[in-house]
Amino acid sequence: MPILSHLHQLFDVDACCAYIHRLRWKDRPLQCPRCQSHHVGPWGTYHYQPGLKRYRCKEQGCTRTFNDLTGTLLDGSKRSMMHWIVATFLLCLSCSSRRIARELGVHIRTGYRWCWWLRNAALSYEIGRRLKGTVEADELYHTAGHKGQAKGGGQKSLGRRARGRRKKREPGRGHYDKDRPAIIAWISRYGGVVVHATRDCTVKTVQKAADTAVQAGRRLYTDSASSYRALRGYAHDFVNHTKKEYARGEVHENRAECLFSLLKPYLRVFRGISKTNLPGYLGFLQFLRNFHQLTAFEQAELILHAALDPTIASRAKKGDFVRCLDHFDLLQTQQN
Ligand SMILES: [Zn+2]
């Protein structure tokens, strides 16, 4: 028998509460989340969350109580703040939601829900990111089907034969409708990454993806695929892989290839992927790559900071940020 089975049991409750308190308010004074009054005072504690302090608004007509978690992603959670801190840290190390649930001693559905909420909070940093400097681009087709989407839940009726893990790839290019959507990576030599999941890799799609990811007029290096050659609005140059040309001086896309070598093991963790979840997972990879100079815990702190902001938290719970980054939808509305 181990002496201790969960890491967070070693944490100091008061230190964690003080940390969350600082992260939520920074140097701002305490403020009532309902009437925005600064006229507040302490009001006891909670029995279910040891260490969490309760405050009461002294404004006449309000007199409501609140705490450091009111309105945040962590609000109402029966688990301690230590659980959340470890979960966010493990998420930044790209652990699966099941692994995180095991390490924390919570149910796998709790782990899955937390992961999505936290991932959504992280995506708030990636909204509207457009790349500067010289940009490299490449595409990849990844198998993504209908994982976890049985009608009515419970006993899974997929309406088809189970596919098995090793779905045989169809030859040629993938397409969203063939359960093999395209992933286009844009990577700047100046620093910064944008990863898009798109339905296909046609000229129209690539142009639209480029316009959202890259600032107009930038230098763009790609391979010789015809979709890139038809791009307008960029100083474009390409290497010809079919002629075994991989670099011609400045012109190469090795950073994009390198990003894919990181992307593949990242996606493998999920053991098969649903195409509805793909944009969310890719958006989180984009966050991790754009802050790769930070340690995993510093990244976790960024996510916790977003999760403790009530405006971001309510949008993250609704999945607003994923919808902003979802290019499947974007292109579907364009087709209709
Ligand atoms: Zn108030």
Image: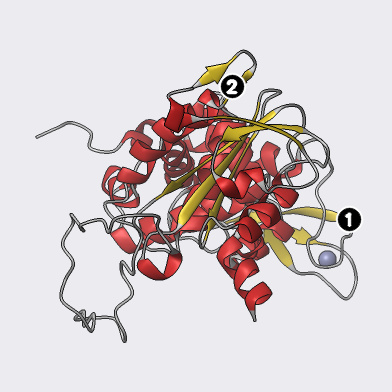
The quadrant of the picture occupied by the N terminus is top left
Name the spot of residue 269 as percent of width and height, x first.
31, 44
Kind of residue indicated by mark 1: His
- Identify the secondary structure beneath mark 1: loop
- Residue at image position (57%, 58%) is 202
Kind of residue indicated by mark 2: Gln
Residue 171 placement: quadrant = bottom left
Q: Is residue 37 visible?
A: yes
Residue 159 placement: quadrant = bottom left
Residue 158's place in the image compared with 228, above or below, is below
Circle 1 residue: 39
Q: Quadrant of ligand 1?
A: bottom right
- Residue at image position (75%, 43%) is 25
Q: State left or right for residue 304 relative to residue 165.
A: right
Q: Is residue 72 visible?
A: no
Report the colour scheme: secondary structure
- Residue at image position (35%, 41%) is 95
Q: Say which of 95 and 238 sits in front.
A: 238
Q: CA distance from mark 2 to mark 1?
A: 41 Å
- Identify the secondary structure beneath mark 2: loop
Return the disc, 2 or 1, that comes first in the chain's sequence.
Answer: 1
Mark 1, Cα crowd under 10 Å, few <14 / some 14-19 / many 20+, is some
Whether the residue carrying mark 1 lies under 8 Å from ligand 1 is answered with yes
Q: Are marks 2 and 1 in contact (CB under 8 Å)?
A: no
Numbered tag placed on residue 270 in the rendering: none
Which of discs 2 and 1 lies nearer the camera? The answer is: 2
Q: State left or right for residue 275 relative to residue 37.
A: left
Name the spot of residue 196 as percent of width and height, x first.
57, 50
- Residue at image position (54%, 46%) is 184
Whether the residue carrying mark 2 lies under 8 Å from ligand 1 is answered with no
Circle 2 residue: 293
Instruction: Report the residue that reaches farthest toward the front.
Output: 243
